[in-house]
Image (cartoon, rainbow, N blue to C red):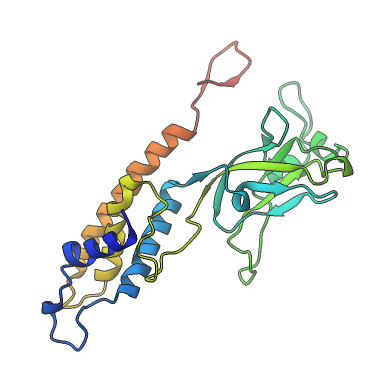
Amino acid sequence: MTLGELLDILRVSILNDRSNNTGATSDYLWTDATLVVYINEAQRRLASKALLLRDGTTDEVTKITLVEGQSEYVLHESVLCVLSAKVVGQHADLTRAGHGVLSTYTAPTESWIDPASFSQLPPGSPVAYSTDEGLQAYDSDNFSQITLRVHPVPSAAVDGTVVRLRVCRKPLDKFTVDALGVEPEVPEDYHLDMLDWAAYLALRVVDDDAGSAKRALEFRASFDQTVKEARAEVMRKIFVPMDWGFGRGGFTWSN
């Protein structure tokens, strides 16, 4: 559905916002610009909470170019999480790790890898990555952006090499009243469900003309249920369950 179609449904069918419903100077209780802001927020929230937008091809979002001596890379502002990372030309993904594994020491045992071995690797082609490295200040320009760290530090031999990411992200562009023919980035199955949140935002302030707080909460509850169901479906699709058994070398990944 297009933004224009969604805007019309929200105004007429959901909010019942018709020109004959008010005697004020404006024909409508909400302007198109206001409702478009609400639809924008609805799509952003749905994508963020349910992880509906998965991307592995958009260069500005999923392409990292390695630089000699640089281990940290601030990702595109739309990225919510990184599902996997792979150096172009290699067959296997990089190992996902965390700050604690890459930067701390644990005494080695027969059962566990020695994390100190990661920090001792000489510069070269990355074998592992983490995304829990960056801690920006609240007033930082990239506070909401994820920092990806690769290890070991890239050497001169891999300078300019591309790392491709698979990510979950927010929408790249915002709706505007000047482009009502565009379609939402979230799947079509969720286009009408977005309007529940937009309606909640429109009705949350008690107004005898616009509606009631009770109606607003009903729309919010409907949207929250959509997020819950959508997220459960996404988790089923993108994460592989882990099983384990005695005498089989501990935990193993299973399809």
**Among the 4 quarters of the image, the one containing residue 151:** top right
Which residue is pictured at 22% across the width and 61% down the height?
Answer: 9
Along the line of sight, the residue nearer the viewer: 147 or 25: 25
Q: Which residue lies furthest to the top in this view?
A: 247
Q: Is 109 located above or below residue 84 in the figure?
A: above
87 relative position to 204: left or right: right
Residue 214 at what x, y percent from top left? 18, 65
Q: Residue furthest bottom?
A: 25
Q: Which of 250 and 147 is in front in this view?
A: 147
Find residue 157 and report its image quarter. Answer: top right
Q: Looking at the picture, how far across and down is residue 119, in whole percent?
A: 82, 40
Residue 157 in the figure: left or right of residue 97: right
- In the image, residue 43 sits, relative to residue 64, either above or below, namely below
Q: How many marks?
A: 0
Q: Is residue 29 above or below residue 172?
A: below
| Residue 176, x across and y down, in percent | 40, 69
Residue at image position (75%, 21%) is 110
Residue in the foreground of this view, choosing between 71 and 14 = 14
User: Measured from the top left, where is residue 22 in percent x and y?
Assistant: 14, 81
Above/below status of 244 relative to 162: above
Residue situated furthest left in the rendering: 20
Residue at position x 66%, y 32% from top? 93
**Residue at left 68%, top 28%?**
92
